[in-house]
Image: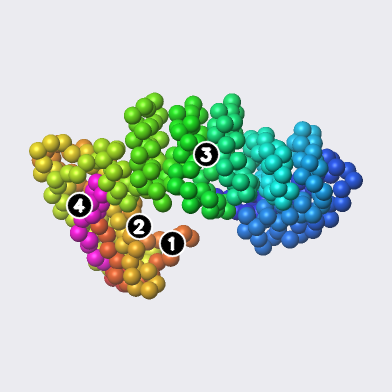
Amino acid sequence: MPFADELISRHTVQSLTHAIRAATPDADLTALRAAARQIGPLPLRQRADLLRDALLTDLPGDYAALARTVRTARDNAPQFTGWLIWPVTSAVATRAVQEDETASFDDAMALLASLTGRLSSEFAIRTLLRHDLDRALNTIVRDWAGSGDADVRRLASEGTRPYLPWAVRVPQILARAGVTVPILDALYRDESEYVRRSVANHLNDLSRDHPEIVVDTARRWLSSPDTSTERLVRHGLRTLIKRGHLGALELLGFAPAVLDVDGPRLDRNVVPLGGSVRLTASIRNTGDSAARLTIDYIVHHRKANGTRTGKTFRLTTRTLAPNERMEVTREHSFRPITTRRYYPGPHAISLQINGVESNRSEFELAPTDTP
């Protein structure tokens, strides 16, 4: 992932300033010039917000005036593309909401759609969704989901995701279970992998709060699939599969199985921070029919307060004939990473097969290279 200063940098501010000055030569762009000196210590979204506010300050007036300037820059400035578009679309959405007029709202929706190919308008659309969810969704379902432009169709799905990364939440979407499902219904068989990937990620977002709606939706899609539907559904159900949700597991063919599980066995009882542990296990199908298995392992990390929290990791998928046995093994590293902090003390590892957890094998995470 690039750093914030690689995405929205002083050079980005300069390009934005040149594009706006070309579109409206008489504008005093004092706030934009000042923003170039202020973005240094800020994270990415705050950089976008700073430039949005600078645009709104430097381009006073009504929504229509701002929209004319943006369209002029869009049509005439070659540098008007890339990450500078994020604060531009955010300014468009903010001014439309401030004006609170239907015509401004509808024009802002159209302008965001026209810009999304230069950089996705997925962040800015959240402002309009929060202001009038039903009006925005009506446009998205009626116009965007059927657009001939794959970027706009992806925006329909991506911009309405409940937990879109880097974006503000839309409380109305979180409160109204399944309100975005009609968008996904319109797009799950889209010809573009780019769009279908967004649909799968949107479905996965929904599974955090509404697993039954997600399973029911996936079941409908699988009853009328195309060549990509099963893959999309598998990706969209990935969090539910890791959680061992029985409805999701059964939908993908992972029914309860009769198994003999020996393990996981660990190659050491004490693991130094920065080191690794190897787990092995033997799994035998003791049932009378073939068993399709999805096999994960769970690392039960010690938290700062002494409790534990499990993190699920993928192992493999396999079909075992009656009485067939398989061996699994995996090396798990405790090398420090930016997304997880490790706390020395008791930890454990278990297997999860078709949603059923095995016995836990305990070990100690040591703060030094304890032998």
Q: Which residue is mark 3?
A: 157
First in residue order: circle 2 vs circle 3: 3
Is residue 342 or residue 91 the one in the foreground?
91
Q: Percent position (x, y) of residue 72?
A: 80, 36
Q: How much space separates mark 4 and mark 2, taking CA atoms? A: 18 Å
Q: Which residue is mark 2?
A: 311
Q: Which residue is mark 4?
A: 281
**Above or below, 211 relative to 111:** below
Point out the stretch of residues depicted in magenta. Answer: 351-363
Is residue 262 or residue 207 the one in the foreground?
207
Asked if disc 4 and disc 2 are in contact, CB closer than 8 Å, the reply is no
Asked if disc 1 and disc 4 are in contact, CB closer than 8 Å, the reply is no
**Looking at the rendered structure, which numbered label has been put on residue 153?**
none
Q: How much space separates mark 1 and mark 4, taking CA atoms? A: 26 Å
First in residue order: circle 3 vs circle 1: 3
Q: Which residue is mark 1?
A: 340
Left or right of 88, for residue 176: left
Magenta span: predominant SS is: strand
Q: How much space separates mark 3 and mark 4, taking CA atoms? A: 41 Å
Which amino acid type corresponds to the residue marked 1 in the rendered image?
A: Arg
First in residue order: circle 1 vs circle 4: 4
Pair 3/1: label in front = 3
Give the farthest residue toward the bottom. 305
Q: How much space separates mark 2 and mark 1, taking CA atoms? A: 11 Å
First in residue order: circle 3 vs circle 4: 3
